[in-house]
Image: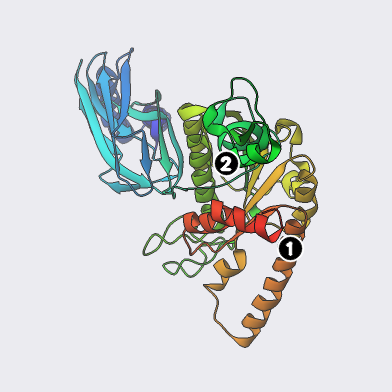
Amino acid sequence: MLGQHRWAFLGSAAFALILIGEILRQGELLVLALPLVCYLAVGFYFALPAQIELKAQRSLSEQRVLSEELVTVRVEIENLGPKLELVELADGVPAPLELRQHSPTRLEALPAGGKTSLEYTVTGVRGLARWEDLSVTITDTLGLFVERRKLPCVSELLIVPTFERLEEILIRPRRTRIFSGQVKARLGGTGIEFFGVREYYPGDERRYINWKATARKDRLIVNEFEQERVADVIILLDARERSDVVRPNPLFPFPKGKGELPSPRRGGAGGEVFSLFEHSVRAALSLAHYFTAQGNRVGLLIYGRYLDWTWPGFGRWQREKLLRAIASAEKGDKAVFEDLENLPTRLLPAGSQLVFVGPILESDVKTIIDLRLRYEVLCIVPNPILFESASLARTPEVELALRLEYLRRQGVLTQLRRAGIRVVDWDVTKPLASVVRGELGRTAWRAALVRRGVL
């Protein structure tokens, strides 16, 4: 209770008793002060050493885990100075994590050159957990002197939520890069898909000769295929608070306070998620993994609390950066980012493929259509109506409200589709991989070309 000034309080009390005893000429008060003086004398004799040198080290069983996986944290401290009578270790558990086993505190003596350690187990749903330092409290034999220190001990743990592996997404950006890949480049050359025919040039392979066309034209005609290259793909993750839908967790049906629903990340039975934003995060993870695996140059923009921009790049290292940024994404309600009109389009490569992930508000339609003038745009839209209706009682009034909201939302999505924007209306109760394969796969692409009369 007295903390670091315990000795000062006892010394002041002893001095006050001696002073009052001398003034009032009462020996009883002097006798009462004698135990305090003796206690202070012994305490100063066994006081903390002048130089205290401690070294701390923290190790994690894993540096990156999936949701709900257990991670063991081990903290070890070494005394490089004289003996310490009482040392208390207290390791803080970062916000994204929850303590599962054991305690992150320990209290014991530490001899000169000795070591001590503590272990505890944590788990989490999603996010980047970061430990900055270790709190150490050192106390002398009688508890008169207390010294608190923060030992530098930086560690990080990345918790990535489970996400689906996508199989096939056909994109047609306006520009491609020079490297060979799997995106149709709208240019004739070597490839798989038939692009057209042309006259034979010296050096063309004989197997590409179209003999039927050659017989009709009476000159050599060869088949030409569409080149396949890599492209610039930018994932736009909507992290605005106003676009999210959070439904009550059956385990905690009532808010904890100030209207905040408890633990929207925490899943229920079967891993159910109670925040629509978490579904958007998992979809963005799936897209980032797919497009980088295809060899594309992928970037990321998280639009919400602030602008979290990850420059486009290639390869496994870029994929790790994207997974790290998406897994650490947090919602925000900054007034400047309420609408999409403040998107920093200067950062986006011209002619690239934009993939917008998140619910689309009515105020976002104009901005997304304007983006279509410079980019190819694909929208992965988690359905907020179906998500929220799962927790509502189906009364006639609720059914009518849902019907009206459904019609309004269909009008918003129709505007985007008429502008040439591909929109995937995703019911989050269904696997994203099957929905994407049915609407963005090769079969769906050819069916769309047939409806337009191209094939």
| Kind of residue at badge 1 | Thr
Q: Residues within 10 Å of mark 1 (few under 14, many from 20)?
A: few
Q: Nearer the viewer, mark 2 or mark 1?
A: 2
Disc 1 designates what residue?
Answer: 414
Quarter occupied by the N terminus = top left
Q: Quadrant of residue 29?
A: top left
Residue 1 located left or right of residue 141: right
As measured in the structure, the alpha-carbon distance from the residue carrying label 2 to the one carrying label 1 is 31 Å
Residue 211, position as x, y percentages in the image = 59, 38
Residue 390, position as x, y percentages in the image = 52, 72
Judging depth in this view, the residue of 49 and 179 nearest the camera is: 179
Q: Which mark is residue 193?
A: 2
Q: Which mark is residue 312?
A: none
Q: Residue at x 61, y 58 (%)?
A: 447
Question: How many labels were placed on the picture?
Answer: 2
Q: Quadrant of residue 151?
A: top left
Quarter occupied by the C terminus = bottom right
Residue 206, position as x, y percentages in the image = 54, 28
Residue 68 vertical placement versus 245 (above, below) = above
Q: How is the image coloured?
A: rainbow
Residue 374, position as x, y percentages in the image = 77, 39
Residue 352 vertical placement versus 362 (above, below) = above
Residue 405 vertical placement versus 197 (above, below) = below
Q: Residue at x 74, y 57 (%)?
A: 416
| Kind of residue at badge 2 | Glu
Whether the residues at callouts 2 and 1 have beta carbons within 8 Å, the answer is no
